[in-house]
């Protein structure tokens, strides 16, 4: 490909106002079919114009292909968002509230296209990057708002780099903004937090579903506690359920305590509704505190009274009795071994529902 062809394509693609102008009509009727068609077209284009292909060319050629790659990435992102919202091919512009910028690290370039949450200490964005196969991978970007709180995100980064579990966030990269705020890039988790689920089930999620969700969370807590990590901030907004594969994720490790057996640190976060009593008075971090917060969160999910530790009448008495062990005010009397609780829950599920493990479709 010569410089004239590259220049001509650059001029043409720079003037495009919608992804449809580049990718045209996509094959297929379903979202997945359209995404597959889009990926095939995008892959051909990005391979043709990727700057790495012109590494030995003159600077202007490298500049043009870099510009082209950026535009292709942006139009590809827009196309995927329109497909997801079932408006691809329609003359509907994406929301002006959406943002679009790039983050470049030593590893790669990340494309950010939407600010979706303002958390207590950070802003969260959706985005993506392109792997070696030119396939898009979804990411979540967490950027600390005040660099004075960088140590919180540094703590989360160090913990996520040290552990791997199917129900935990996946660390990808990190960076600093030009102003010095720390940023974390992790794999985006599709799903619904407990607050969203409760909105769809205002009277409480049926106990059969709550039990398999609890089982997944006890598994991940068992893993964390075995690795001497206390989460320290379990509450409904920090748990994400992915119904299609029955996975549940525990997120947000800003206030987690590593090396909990050998630390003089105390809890850094207190939630009046979900933290254990010993957290408020800043006792030494212990696994039982996470168990308490998990019990409160499941109580919320079931539609119970979190303040009074009251379960709905519809919940089987054997299940509510089991969960009350999580909610003992005294950590000395409270259940503390997540793995032991996991095994007991399996037995309880067989006793109450007739099966230790069963796949129940959860409609959300």
Image (cartoon, helix red, strand yellow):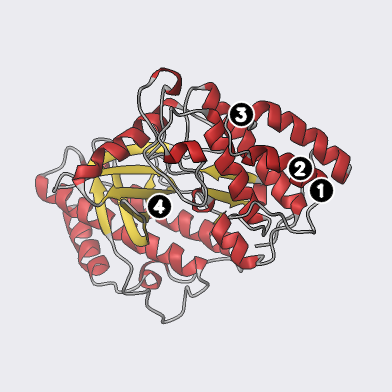
Dot 4: few (<14), some (14–19), or many (≥20) neighbours within 10 Å?
few
| Residue 34 location (% of width, % of height) | 54, 63
Q: CA distance from mark 1 to mark 4?
A: 60 Å
For the point 65% across and 62% down, which residue is it?
364
Q: CA distance from mark 1 to mark 2?
A: 6 Å
Sequence-earlier tag: 3 or 1:
1
Local crowd size for mark 1, using a 10 Å CA cut-off: few (<14), some (14–19), many (≥20): few
Tell me, yes or no, whether the two marked residues, 2 and 4, touch with CB atoms within 8 Å.
Answer: no
The residue where tag 4 is placed is: 44
Q: Which residue is tagged 2? A: 321
Is residue 30 visible in the rendered image? The answer is no
Residue drawn at x 46%, y 42% as measured from the top left: 233
Which residue is denoted by mark 1 in the rendering?
317
* SS state under label 1: helix
Considering depth in this image, is 2 or 161 the residue closer to the camera?
161
Visible in this render: residue 362? yes
Residue furthest left in the image = 59
Report the number of discs.
Answer: 4
Q: CA distance from mark 3 to mark 1?
A: 21 Å
User: How far apart in space, not on screen, are marks 4 and 3 (Cα)?
Assistant: 55 Å
Q: Which sits earlier in the primary sequence, circle 3 or circle 2? A: 2
């Amino acid at each position: 490909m010569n410089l004239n062809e590259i220049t001509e394509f650059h001029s043409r693609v720079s003037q495009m106002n919608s992804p449809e102008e580049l990718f045209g009509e996509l094959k297929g009727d379903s979202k997945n079919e359209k995404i597959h068609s889009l990926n095939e077209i995008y892959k051909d284009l990005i391979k043709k114009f990727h700057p790495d292909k012109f590494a030995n060319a003159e600077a202007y050629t490298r500049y043009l292909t870099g510009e082209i790659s950026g535009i292709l990435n942006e139009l590809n992102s827009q196309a995927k968002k329109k497909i997801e919202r079932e408006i691809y091919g329609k003359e509907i512009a994406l929301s002006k509230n959406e943002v679009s910028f790039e983050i470049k690290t030593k590893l790669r370039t990340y494309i950010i296209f939407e600010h979706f949450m303002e958390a207590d200490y950070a802003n969260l964005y959706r985005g993506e990057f392109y792997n070696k196969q030119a396939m898009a991978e979804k990411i979540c970007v967490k950027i600390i708002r005040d660099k004075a709180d960088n140590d919180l995100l540094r703590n989360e980064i160090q913990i996520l780099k040290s552990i791997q579990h199917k129900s935990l966030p996946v660390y990808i990269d990190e960076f600093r903004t030009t102003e010095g705020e720390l940023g974390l890039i992790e794999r985006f988790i599709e799903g619904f937090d407990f607050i969203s689920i409760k909105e769809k089930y205002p009277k409480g999620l049926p106990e059969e579903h709550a039990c398999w969700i609890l089982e997944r969370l006890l598994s991940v807590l068992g893993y964390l506690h075995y690795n001497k990590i206390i989460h320290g901030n379990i509450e409904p907004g920090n748990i994400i359920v992915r119904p299609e594969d029955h996975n549940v994720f525990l997120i947000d490790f800003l206030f987690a305590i590593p090396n909990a057996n050998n630390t003089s640190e105390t809890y850094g976060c207190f939630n009046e509704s979900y933290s254990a009593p010993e957290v408020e008075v800043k006792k030494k971090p212990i696994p039982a505190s996470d168990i308490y917060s998990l019990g409160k969160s499941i109580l919320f999910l079931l539609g119970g009274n979190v303040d009074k530790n009251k379960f709905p009448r519809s919940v089987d008495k054997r299940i509510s009795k089991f969960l009350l062990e999580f909610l003992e005010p005294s950590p000395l009397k409270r259940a503390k071994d997540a793995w032991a609780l996991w095994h007991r829950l399996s037995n309880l599920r067989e006793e109450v529902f007739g099966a230790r493990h069963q796949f129940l479709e959860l409609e959300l």
